[in-house]
Image: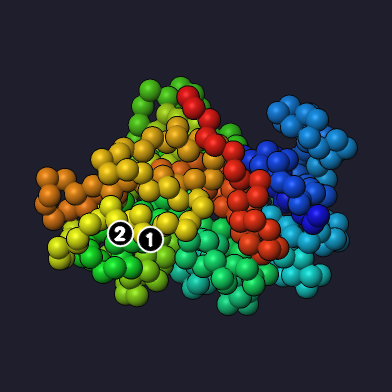
Amino acid sequence: MIKVGIVGGTGYTGVELLRLLAQHPQVEVAAITSRSEAGLAVDELYPNLRGHYPGLAFTAPDAELLGRCDAVFFATPHGVAHALAGDLLERGTRVIDLSADFRLEDAEEWAQWYGQPHGAPALLEEAVYGLPEVNREAIRKARLIAVPGCYPTAVQLGLLPLLESGLIDIEHVIADCKSGVTGAGRGAKVGSLLAEASESMKAYGASGHRHLPEIRQGLGRAAKKPVGLTFVPHLTPMIRGIHATLFGRLTQEPGDLQALFEDRFKDEPAVDVMPAGSHPETRSVKGSDICRLAVHRPGGGDTVVVLSVIDNLVKGASGQAIQNLNLMFGFDEMAGLNAPALMP
Ligand SMILES: NC(=O)C1=CN([C@@H]2O[C@H](COP(=O)(O)OP(=O)(O)OC[C@H]3O[C@@H](n4cnc5c(N)ncnc54)[C@H](OP(=O)(O)O)[C@@H]3O)[C@@H](O)[C@H]2O)C=CC1
Ligand SMILES: CC(=O)N[C@@H](CCC(=O)OP(=O)(O)O)C(=O)O
């Protein structure tokens, strides 16, 4: 049994960590922080947790308390892990950061996209990008994990087979992505109000979203060359889910694309390549740590279309964070993550 802490326990990814860890046989949640709800029992704020965490209450963030844990998850806005991660690592506590603080390898680029100086550039070299389908061995040995963003997870998983095999034009890749509103977090925002977000759909960040450099970095590593990407996210009237429709232009006859995808992910516990002709639905992954993929070649032409769906709060955040924890501590990779999705 290991002890974990959660910084930012009142947010959507924080409560999702609690929901998933309640089913984990080898993990005890020993500390959970919130500045605004310090003193409140977790199941008073989130009644779905009643009976699962008796006696667990939010406390203000405290490095000494968190440093008694084997690992700490940061489910906090950008910049918070910068300030605390170094201290925890020195105390021997491993850090799994769900924010973007350690995702970009270049501190200058991070500062440009996030509008503030990078707060811990000295830690960037040892941070491991926590996409198990690419970095499993490095994750096992890591002390500091940057959990990928939600859009970057859906896009990278869908494009990896095509980029690794060099089958598409890497200068013109397109990712047309849709997200549910929990992607914006639990904080009150006008755009997340029922009257604003329901029965409507809109693109945002079309001229440059902060996930663009992260996705480009990951795709570039897969292709071993810089990739030209157009990425347009959309807000859709659903609570959870990401649907990514990905377009690549074939540069050669690809052979059997279905077999390429099935082979690439045959040993991946969190990726499901659906039968040829499928159209995966976001509800088929709701609450689960699975990315479901389908590959199409419309009319046998020179465009490949990949459909990739995840739950933004699970494979796109807290579930993937637990996959990383499991690898770091030698547990079964899917411990706590095996429940099927909720349907309908
Ligand atoms: N929502 C999603 O789908 C995804 C989110 N992420 C990332 O995960 C992180 C958390 O997201 P989400 O759960 O949606 O966020 P929320 O806005 O829902 O929650 C943020 C949490 O952080 C705490 N917090 C805020 N500021 C600070 C601070 N300065 N110091 C300590 N704690 C703080 C808040 O509690 P309090 O203010 O009471 O301390 C709250 O518990 C973000 O970086 C987000 O970008 C990543 C992938 C997907
Ligand atoms: C719908 C919505 O607003 N989504 C968020 C991204 C989701 C997210 O949490 O971003 P990170 O993975 O980088 O933390 C956004 O576009 O900013």
- Element type at marker 1? helix
Horizontal side of residue 301 vs 70, given as left or right? left
The answer to whether 320 appears left or right of 222 in the picture is: right
**To which quarter of the image does residue 338 belong?**
top right
Q: Is residue 287 visible?
A: yes
Which quarter of the figure has residue 169?
bottom left
* Residue highlighted by disc 2: 260
Q: Pointer 1 and pointer 2: residues touching (CB < 8 Å)?
A: yes
Spot occupied by residue 6 in the image (x, y as percentages of width and height): 73, 50
Q: Which of the two residues, 245 or 99, is positioned nearer the viewer here?
A: 245
Residue at the image position 78 percent from the left and 73 percent from the top: 90
Q: Nearer the viewer, residue 244 or 339?
A: 339
Separation of residues labelled 1 and 2 (CA atoms): 6 Å
Q: Position of residue 47 (x, y in %)?
A: 73, 27
Q: Image quadrant for the N terminus?
A: bottom right
Identify the residue at image location x=37%, y=69%.
222
Q: Which residue is mark 1?
A: 264
| Side of 131 relative to 250 (left or right) | right
Q: Nearer the viewer, residue 261 or 76?
A: 261
Residue 97 image position (x, y, % from top left): 63, 58
